[in-house]
Amino acid sequence: MEEILSNDEIDALLNLFQNEGMPEELEGSAEFDLHSAALNSGKVADMDLLKPNRFTRDQLQAITRIQEMVARKLGGAVSDRLRLDVVADCVAVEQLRFSTWCELLQNPMGVYVLDLDPLGSPAVLTMSAELLYGAVDRILGGTGEIRTGVKDLSEAEHAVADSLVQPVLEQLAAGIGELVPVRPRITGRFTNPGMAQVLPMQEVVLSLHFQISGQPLFGDLRLVVPYSALEPHLGSLEKGSPGTSGGPEGAYREVLGRNVKNVPAEVAIELGGTRMRLKDLMSMQIGDVIRLDAKPGDPVKLPVQGRLKFHGDLGTRGRRFAVRISRVLEG
């Protein structure tokens, strides 16, 4: 079996060639004459040896599912802060070299260097200029539409922008929290993307790309976190992720609780029930009486989303009817 180089060995080999050039013993070797090999066999193809391969496909798929849930909450957070109907989409979850990620940045844009305690390595959040300057204008009472050229933000404008960035960070941190709980803290704010180069250029990073759209705002959010900081915590993805099978009973109770605790649920109160023939139901008139199967004093039923969940006692609280829960039904 032929020996397969590891990623670290490939990196070392590339660094050797870049720093010292082709070793003398290999220069002119037929093994490295790609042009001749291509002509003779037709089987040689270009290969990008710099393309990172740290995260497995299953890990990226699990992270993508998490970030799709984050995107929905991210849209709600931005909508609430800017008082606009905004939608957020998770555009891409990728592993990249940090140098490749930096090439995606445009000048100017919002750049936020982050400390994600306890990861111990800096992360970077960027916000496209249209979104950043539009959000500042909207928070200050404008429409959010930018008609003139952008300029560097003042300290006061950065403080205004922070009122949007902070809730955005909370949602992004919640997504990373599926791997490891983090406490994000902004350590630097810039509008020059050159200031985002806080990691080694060959560092492999996890890139999360979100798109915010809403009239008139439209722009991108990107978060980049070093692979080396996340690697010790990737085992939690192998144990299963929200929405997948596996894991002990109740393993995802806390995760699901965070994700659904703000979802509205319909709670009804049933005083009793009865069965009627259709012809009797269709002939009912004002003043007719329906006899229920419950007696005065019997506990009332409280279905949640149509499923019976509680029993309770009917009473009043102030000038309103109320029900006191007397029993929680299992299942």
Image (tube, rainbow, N blue to C red):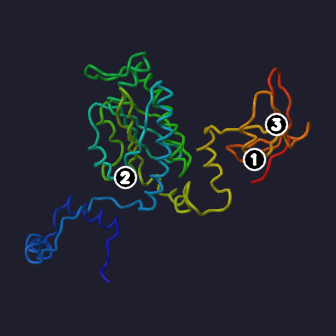
Which residue is located at x 28 percent, y 43 percent?
104
Query: Which of the two discs, 1 and 3, sits closer to the camera?
Result: 3
Looking at the image, residue 192 lies above or below residue 198 = above
Could you say which quadrant of the image residue 56 lies in? bottom left
**Other-residue count near label 3 (Cα within 10 Å), few / some / many at <14 / 14–19 / ≥20:** few
Residue 102: % across, % down:
29, 43
Q: Nearer the viewer, mark 3 or mark 2?
A: 3
- Which picture quadrant has residue 44? bottom left
Crowd class of label 1 (few under 14; some 14 to 19; many from 20; radius 10 Å): some
Please name the amino acid that badge 3 sits on: Ile
The tag earlier along the polypeptide, 3 or 2, is 2
Residue holding disc 1:
308
**Residue 14 drawn at (x, y percent):** 24, 62
**Mark 3 falls on what kind of element?**
loop
- The outermost residue toward the top is 141
Nearer to us in this view, 231 or 244: 244
Q: CA distance from mark 1 to mark 3?
A: 22 Å
Along the line of sight, the residue nearer the viewer: 112 or 236: 236
Mark linked to residue 245: none
**Tag 2: residue type?**
Glu
User: Residue at image x 26%, y 19%?
Assistant: 148
Q: Quadrant of the N terminus?
A: bottom left
Q: Which residue is mark 2?
A: 94
Q: Which residue is mark 3?
A: 290
